Each structure stands twice: as structure tokens, then as C-alpha cells.
């Protein structure tokens, strides 16, 4: 990895040394209530770097001070956390966060992303089926990938889920199986700007060309980008802003909700981006993402409260740029259906002796 990746990693790491938990609109455990994180912002984080970030509360937007990475000490995203004894579960936690943010999870007296995650766990829905099928079951009640996983016992969950049975799932879900270039990350940004939620899949390999030995899922809440570079430059995006379901593995609803920053860098030898999420001394590869459109009555909430933190306010439906001389129009893209991949969400057990990453265990 080049020095640039390490430099961005250091900025990300030191900025999350402490987190403030003074926030309203949370439950007794400090977890955000569904429907309260509807703000987004663009702001400088130092030098020529800017951040675009969604899923903020109004209180957090007002507390962010442009010019530093201190926002990582302020922002507490939807962050469902694994409970003790869970090896897998990152996919279900990611789904819960996405459903909470987009409003689809605002049903059945669910109050937080943790409530949705608990529902998946108590119904014994299998984490291995992936994000696309996991959300489909919650929305429509359908379990469409049984042919790929014939050994899974569907009895506990087959007649559950289905909280929005009249919704045409194909119109709200999108799978992009490969993040192959800067344009794919720009697509992620534009989907976030239309109120969508993003679930990212990352993988690790012993070396290029070998099968993956680990896979992990996490929601993406924003990006850091370099305004000194062109948006078509593969070095334009320098980091992803995410959260991880295992950074406080085993604490469940008691876990703090933490926004994390991981540097990314284009690796020409594998024709992919590496992400500074380390496992056994190896950086992750960005693999593919899943996008979920917001519930129609939530969409305006998620796009109307956008601010550039230089004293101006904007509506995110208007042309907004992630680089000042390159306007991007944020009309909602059609979310076309693609065949869901058979790739499962295989996570690495917490505490594994092989996991020597600088940051949180899976």
C-alpha cells in the first residue's frame, strides 16, 4: 500500500479516539430512534479534503465544526451491534441499519435498528443469504434464494417478515456486484444523495487471484474526497465513512454507536480499491454494494435537510456538487433489478488469533 493510504488512515484513527454521547432522540441505551437521522452535510475536513455524510441528526449537524476530523467524535449512526456468541451477523446488522434509515423499518413498533436486528435474530433468519434476499424477506415476506441454500431450515421465518407486501421489490433494490472503478463510488454517493441506503461488501484474499478467505458487510454513510483532484481520478475518493457491527462485539444494544473512517486507495494490480480495514495484515478489497431506495414518505425527509457547512443551506434535490466546478444533478435514479448474487456474508469470529487488524475485530 502506498503512503497516501496510511496517511489518511492515521487521520481517521486519531479522530475516533473519543465519542460524545450527548444526543436527543435516542432510546434508554443511547440508540437512535428510527426517523430521527434525516440530515446530511458537506464540509471541509482539512486542506483540500471534504466530507459528504448522510444519516445525521439536526443536533449533530449543528455541532460539526468544519476543518477537522472531529465530526467522528460527534456522529452516532444507526449501528446495530452483534451480541455475545455471534460469529456471523454482519449482514443482518447492516440490513437493520439500512431499513431504519430508509424508513422501511418504521413498522411493527420497531423503535431502533437494534430492534430490527433482534427481530431477524429471533426469527433465525440466516445471515448467509446476503443483503438482497435479507431485505426482500423483510419487505415482501418472500424468500427467493432457497434454491441457492437448500440446506437452510426455513421453518422459523418462512411466514414472517413481509411488512410491505404490496411493494414491488424490484423497484426499490439494486445490486452492483462489482466496484471496479471510481464511477462505482460516485454511484454510491449519488444514491445516498437521493435518500438511499448502501450496504457494502468487502473481502480479503491471501493474494490476488485466490478465493476470498473472509467477507464482511457494513453500511456506508458517506465519503471523503479531494477537491484538488478531478472526480474521474481514481484518487478522488480517499476514504469511506461506515460503521461496523462488531467494533464492540458482544455488547449488543449497550454498544456505543460509532462512525468509522477507513482510507481507500486504487490498486492497479488487482483493478480494485483497497480499504484500510486490516485482517491478518491484509487490506480489504471493495467488492460490491447493495442499494435500497427510501420509503416514499421518508424520501423528502432525507433529501430536504442538506447543508454545506459554510453558513449556507441547500435542498439536496437541487444540483449539488462534490467538487465545486463539477455539478452533479441528483434526480433519483431508477433502481433496476439484477439477479441477486449467491455470495454469502461469511464473517470472521471475533477474537480469532488470526485477526491482528489495527481496528475493530469482525
Image (cartoon, rainbow, N blue to C red):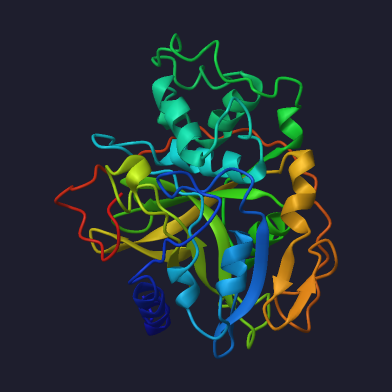
Residue at horizontal 33 percent and vertical 72 percent from the top: 17
Give percent across and percent down for residue 261.
Answer: 44, 67
Q: Residue at x 81, y 75 (%)?
A: 327
Q: Position of residue 121 (x, y in %)?
A: 40, 27
Q: Who is closer to the viewer here, 248 or 264?
A: 248
Question: Is residue 350 found left or right of 165 in the rendered image?
Answer: left
Placement of 41 over or under 199, stated as above or below: below
Image quadrant in which you'd find residue 167: top right
- Residue 9, placed above or below residue 336: below
* Lateral position of residue 141 relative to residue 94, left or right: right
Residue 268 appears anywhere in the view? no
Residue sitting at x 76%, y 27%: 168
Q: Residue furthest left?
A: 353
Q: Position of residue 116 (x, y in %)?
A: 50, 33
The furthest residue to the bottom: 47
Q: Nearer the viewer, residue 190 or 15?
A: 15
Label total for image: 0
Can you see residue 21?
Answer: yes
Query: Looking at the rendering, in which quadrant would you find the N terminus?
Result: bottom left
Residue 344: % across, % down: 43, 35
Amino acid at each position: 500500500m502506498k503512503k497516501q493510504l496510511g496517511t489518511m488512515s492515521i487521520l481517521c484513527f486519531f479522530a475516533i479516539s473519543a465519542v460524545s454521547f450527548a444526543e436527543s432522540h435516542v432510546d434508554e441505551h443511547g440508540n437512535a430512534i428510527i426517523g430521527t437521522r434525516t440530515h446530511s452535510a458537506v464540509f471541509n475536513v482539512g486542506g483540500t479534503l471534504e466530507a459528504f455524510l448522510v444519516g445525521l441528526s439536526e443536533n449533530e449537524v449543528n455541532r460539526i465544526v468544519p476543518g477537522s476530523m472531529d465530526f467522528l467524535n460527534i456522529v452516532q449512526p444507526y449501528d446495530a451491534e452483534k451480541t455475545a456468541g455471534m460469529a456471523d451477523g454482519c449482514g443482518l446488522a447492516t440490513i437493520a441499519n439500512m431499513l431504519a434509515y430508509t424508513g422501511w423499518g418504521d413498522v411493527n413498533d420497531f423503535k431502533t435498528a437494534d430492534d430490527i436486528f433482534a427481530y431477524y435474530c429471533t426469527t433465525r433468519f440466516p445471515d448467509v443469504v446476503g443483503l438482497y434476499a435479507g431485505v426482500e424477506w423483510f419487505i415482501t415476506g418472500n424468500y427467493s434464494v432457497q434454491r441457492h441454500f437448500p440446506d437452510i431450515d426455513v421453518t422459523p421465518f418462512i411466514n414472517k417478515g413481509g411488512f410491505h407486501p404490496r411493494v414491488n421489490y424490484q423497484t426499490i433494490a439494486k445490486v452492483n456486484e462489482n466496484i471496479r472503478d471510481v464511477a462505482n463510488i460516485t454511484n454510491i454517493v449519488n444514491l445516498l444523495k437521493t435518500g438511499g441506503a448502501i450496504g457494502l461488501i468487502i473481502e480479503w484474499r491471501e493474494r490476488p487471484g485466490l478465493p476470498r478467505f473472509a467477507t464482511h458487510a457494513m453500511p456506508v454513510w458517506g465519503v471523503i474526497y479531494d477537491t484538488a483532484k478531478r472526480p474521474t481520478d481514481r484518487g478522488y475518493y480517499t476514504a469511506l465513512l461506515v460503521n461496523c457491527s462488531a467494533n464492540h462485539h458482544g455488547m449488543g444494544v449497550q454498544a456505543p454507536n460509532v462512525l468509522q473512517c477507513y482510507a481507500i486507495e486504487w490498486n492497479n494490480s488487482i483493478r480494485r480499491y483497497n480499504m484500510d480495514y486490516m485482517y491478518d495484515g491484509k487490506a480489504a478489497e471493495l467488492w460490491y454494494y447493495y442499494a435500497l431506495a427510501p420509503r416514499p414518505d421518508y424520501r423528502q425527509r432525507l433529501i430536504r435537510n442538506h447543508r454545506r457547512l459554510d453558513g449556507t443551506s441547500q435542498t439536496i434535490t437541487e444540483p449539488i456538487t462534490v467538487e465545486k466546478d463539477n455539478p452533479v444533478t441528483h434526480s433519483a435514479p431508477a433502481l433496476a433489478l439484477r439477479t441477486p448474487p449467491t455470495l454469502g456474508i461469511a464473517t470472521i469470529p471475533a477474537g480469532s488469533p488470526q485477526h491482528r487488524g489495527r481496528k475493530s475485530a469482525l
